[in-house]
Image (cartoon, rainbow, N blue to C red):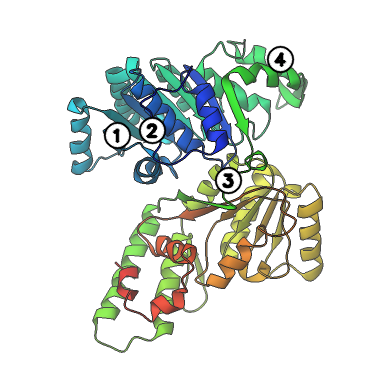
Amino acid sequence: MSLPEKLTFKTTPFAHQLDCLEKSWSMKNYALFLEMGCGKSKVLIDTAAALYHAGKIDAVLLIAPKGVYMNWVDKELPTHWPDDIPIISSYWQSPAKPELQDEWRKFKTFKGLRWMSMNVEAFSYESGLKFASSFINAYGERLLIGIDESTTIKNISAQRTKNIIALGKKAAYRRIMTGDPVPKGPIDMYSQCCFLSPHLLGYTSFYAFRARYCIMVERTGGNRSFKMITGYQRLDELKESIKPFSYRVTKDECLDLPPKVYQTWDVELSKEQLKLYKQMKDEAVALLRSGEVVTAPMVITQLLRLHQITCGFLKTDDGTEIDLPNPRIDALMDVLAGIGGKVIIWATYRNNIKKILKALEDEYGKESVVSYYGDTDSEERRAAVQGFQNGAVRFFVGNPATGRFGLTLTASASVVYFSNSYDLEHRTQSEDRVHRIGQTASSVNYVDLVCRNTVDERIIKALRSKRKISAIINGDELREWFS
């Protein structure tokens, strides 16, 4: 079906985005399997605009991981939503601040498109389910539900997956989005497609689907027997069954993408981090206001400690490291779940690198990851690069200061910055380990983990704008960093 004549684009779509939109916008159920960095967010936004112009919807419920659900309201919609369509947008939080509750009340009488973003974790709790049910019941017949990073519902036995599938049945249109729909195998596909419609794959039973596409063996342990997946079969058949309701594209196939694509993934501070961060920030502000002579090293020490807190630990004056509850590790694993293929992960602190290595080894196996930082000896460094470039190693975890010179890491086109240093050279050089001669992908995707309203956010903003933080520290902007 042709796109509505009234549809306008606030940002010009790339060729693959327009192709995907034209093929999918009018379909009730569709999967956007665009690799990270290929712009699936814009496709969904333009789909909603097209359906609105066609008189099919007047509301969207966007479900996404904790790290991105607010980005849709704060960044994606302002960037891509057409100016000629009135829109009201908000996101769910519990407990809700009074100003958020005021926004929600306006939805009922608003003339235009209503957009609500929710954290996928909300569907595990009564308060989130109650709110979502109310929203869906109000707009269900004219509602589009989209799930960003839909591998978050890959576990068919998880209660939140069951809740989302049940609520999704009430929507007029459904979309799933992920760059890698099968992070651990085809079995991950079932519940994602079941959200769209239980009939799309031809199997309304998970066990029938598993029996068709998985090779199972009987195992015994703990006085009981169970079936274990040892391999997969009929994958060509499964691939063909998915084609009618999905669009798959990788960065290699998108010739008109910019050479570098930047994204952020929000990380919420834990209660312990938030308390300590506020305490340290107040001390820094008091120092600046005291009238005493404040030197650059003193400022750097304060900023360093604030940054360490956002990264999950604090190093005291005597060198002792105090570990804090660190949601950043969980955020990293969420990001990686949506990326297929090899990934480079840069982190500033040894403390973080060791925890990243453990998390990856536990999830993907020790053979899948190598390290390149101060504790890695020369021979291990050489083997790490070779294993990543030419072998089966999937994750390269390094320190930008250690790995910024002389390395070629073109086996990957996906880079995650777990944390950044204050050094602009570390950032630019580490970016170019991937974006250099030998890179076959047309575009490299960079993802920054960031804690909002902290020095973390200001560091990334300064580095991306190619500004030396040392100059800022010595300038008039210093006070803003502690605001």
Q: Looking at the image, can residue 129 be seen?
A: no
Whole-percent x, y for residue 276 in the image? 36, 63
- Residue that badge 1 annotates: 84
Q: Is residue 443 above or below residue 338?
A: below
The image quadrant that residue 84 belongs to is: top left
Q: Please say if the residues under marks 2 and 1 sit with CB atoms less than 8 Å apart.
A: yes
**Residue farthest toward the front in the current orientation of the protein:** 5
- Which numbered dot is residue 257? 3
SS at mark 1 in the image: loop
Cα distance in 3D space between marks 2 and 3:
21 Å
Type of amino acid at the residue the image marks with label 2: Thr
Q: Residue at x 76, y 69 (%)?
A: 377
> Looking at the picture, which amino acid does disc 1 mark?
Asp
Q: Secondary structure at mark 3?
A: loop
Mark 3 touching mark 1, by CB under 8 A? no
Label 3 neighbour load within 10 Å: few <14, some 14-19, many 20+ = some
